Image (spheres, helix red, strand yellow):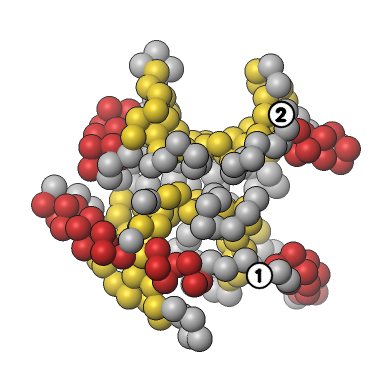
Amino acid sequence: MVMIIKYGYSSPYDGKWSKTMVGYGPEDNHFVAELTYNYGIGEYRLGNDFLGITLVSSQAVSNAKKMGWPLKEVTTGVFEAEAPGGYKFYLEDKEKIKQDPVLKVTLGVSNLQKSLNYWSGLLGMKIYEKDEEKQRALLGYADNQCKLELKAVGGAVDHGTAFGRIAFSCAKGELPNIEALMKKENQKILTPLVSLDTPGKATVQVIILADPDGHEICFVGDEAFRDLSKVDPNGDKLLDDAMAADNSDKWFAEHKMKKISA
């Protein structure tokens, strides 16, 4: 079985960076977001490639209101919130469901049918919904997992300067078949099937593709991935400590320098 495991931001930057995986539960059965922080970069230009994450959580809505975080009700019971970097979140004001409360990730596409031919026809995702009038479709690999929504943006897809990558886990035995299919169909392979060593942990197999609009897609061998994705019980504290130790703003101010905009 293949499942969505994350949507993370990659980048062309070669400096110091750190990343954090966040979600509502273990990556074995929950969607997670990969947050990447590039030291020395003060601002990114957003494109129209990543259109938002939709989740069910009355607590998230309540928390936002308590904190005075701006919310815009876009339809009855659904609120739009904007993260500090400008990324959109859509919060359904309902009690958190038993399964993963992250319902869907929405990506912009230039041609809906062409994208469906790729994601469904080649990658085998099931089409759950399709709305020709609104030029959107909902796809997934399983009923109880986070879905992928494709939405036409009415033109070319612009990945901005902080483009993302969506990742899926699957049995490692499926990876050579995926690579062979992409070669047969003359589709873009950004990184051919490769094994990546993680010191002290597993060696994971990955292949990275690109869809017709340049959205990066990473397929990861599930067996090794499960070893790498174990929940760290000290994760929250480690993140808090890392943020407290980041004095980059102070350093730049002391050296009379300004963080660059990507």
Decide: is 175 above or below 32: below
Question: Is residue 86 shown to the viewer in this render?
Answer: yes
Q: Toward the viewer: 5 or 84?
A: 5
Residue 35 image point, x, y percent: 60, 58
Residue 115 appears in the picture as rendered = no
Q: Tag 1: residue type?
A: Asp
Amino acid type of the residue that numbered disc 2 sits on in the rendered structure? Lys
Residue drawn at point x = 49 percent, y = 81 percent: 201
Task: Name the residue at 59% across, 35% down.
Answer: 54
Residue found at the far right of this picture: 66
| Element marked by disc 2 | loop
Residue 232: mark: 1
- In the image, residue 120 lies at what x, y percent? 28, 37
Q: Which mark is residue 96?
A: none
Question: Which x, y percent locates residue 239?
Answer: 72, 67
Residues at discs 1 and 2 in contact (Cβ within 8 Å): no
Camera-nearest residue between 123 and 19: 123
Indicate the quadrant containing the C terminus: top left, top right, bottom left or bottom right.
bottom right
Residue in the image at 48% along x and 47% along y: 160
Relative to 58, 222 lies left or right: left
Q: Name the residue rendered at 42%, 54% in the picture.
A: 167
Furthest-bottom residue in this view? 200
Q: Which image quadrant for residue 158?
A: top left
Question: Is residue 157 or residue 244 the one in the foreground?
Answer: 244
Q: Residue 94 carries which label?
A: 2
Residue 236 image point, x, y percent: 74, 64
Mark 1 / mark 2, whichever is N-terminal: 2
Instruction: Residue at the far left: name it.
Output: 184
